[in-house]
Amino acid sequence: MSGRPLLDAPGALGEVGPDETREFRARLAAGDFCLQRCHGCRTEHFPPGPACWRCGQVGLEWLPVEDPSAVVRSAVTIHRSFMAFADQVPYAVVLGELRAHPGVRVIARLAGEAVPIGSGVELVWTGDPSRAGYHWEPRP
Ligand SMILES: [Zn+2]
C-alpha cells in the first residue's frame, strides 16, 4: 500500500467507495439524504448498496427522506476516535429508526449529550464531505 491512508485524506468520505456510496454522497451534497428502495419487493435500505438484501434484485431506486425524525434504538459513547471525529471525543453514536420508514435504521454521531433509548432524534444533513455529512440531533 502506498500514498496517504484513504480515510485520512481530506474529502475522502465523498471520493472513495462503491458506486452507490459515491451516488449517496453526491445526493447528500446536493441536499438530499436518500435511502434506496427495491423495485421488486419494495424493501427500503440504508446504507446504500448494489442489491436488495431481501430478494437480491439489483438497481435499487433512490428515495429522498422527507421526514428525518427517528426513535433511538441503541446508543454508545465513543471515548477514543481517529480521523475526522478525533477532536470531538467523547461523543455519542446513535442507531435511530426513521419514523416514516419503519425498519430503516441509520447510525450516526449525536450532536450533544447521550440520550436514552426510545428518545426522539432528528437526522440533520450538512453534506460536509470531511465528516460523515449527517448527524443526529435530540428532538423531544
Ligand atoms: Zn427486494
Image (cartoon, rainbow, N blue to C red):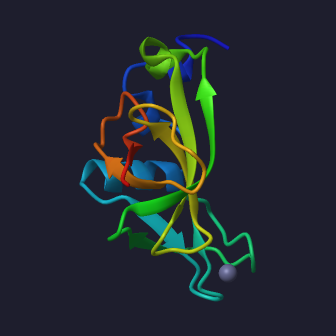
**Residue lying farthest to the left in this orientation:** 30
Q: Does residue 15 lie above or below 84 as drawn? A: below
Q: Does residue 64 lie above or below 2 as drawn? A: below
- Judge left or right: residue 121 versus residue 116: left
Residue 106, image x and y in percent?
Answer: 55, 54
Residue drawn at (24%, 54%) of the image: 30
Foreground pick, 11 / 32: 32
Residue 4, image x and y in percent?
Answer: 52, 12
Residue drawn at (38%, 20%) of the image: 10
Q: Quadrant of the C terminus?
A: bottom left
Residue 99, image x and y in percent?
Answer: 48, 70
Count of numbered circles on the image: 0
Foreground pick, 16 / 83: 83
Q: Quadrant of ligand 1?
A: bottom right
Q: Is residue 47 visible?
A: no
Q: Is residue 38 visible?
A: yes
- Judge left or right: residue 2 versus residue 88: right
Residue 71, image x and y in percent?
Answer: 52, 60
Foreground pick, 6 / 88: 88
Q: Does residue 96 lie above or below 56 as drawn? A: above
Q: Quadrant of the N terminus?
A: top right
Q: Quadrant of residue 135?
A: top left
Residue drawn at (30%, 36%) of the image: 128
Residue drawn at (43%, 18%) of the image: 88
- Judge left or right: residue 34 versus residue 116: left
Q: Quadrant of residue 57?
A: bottom right
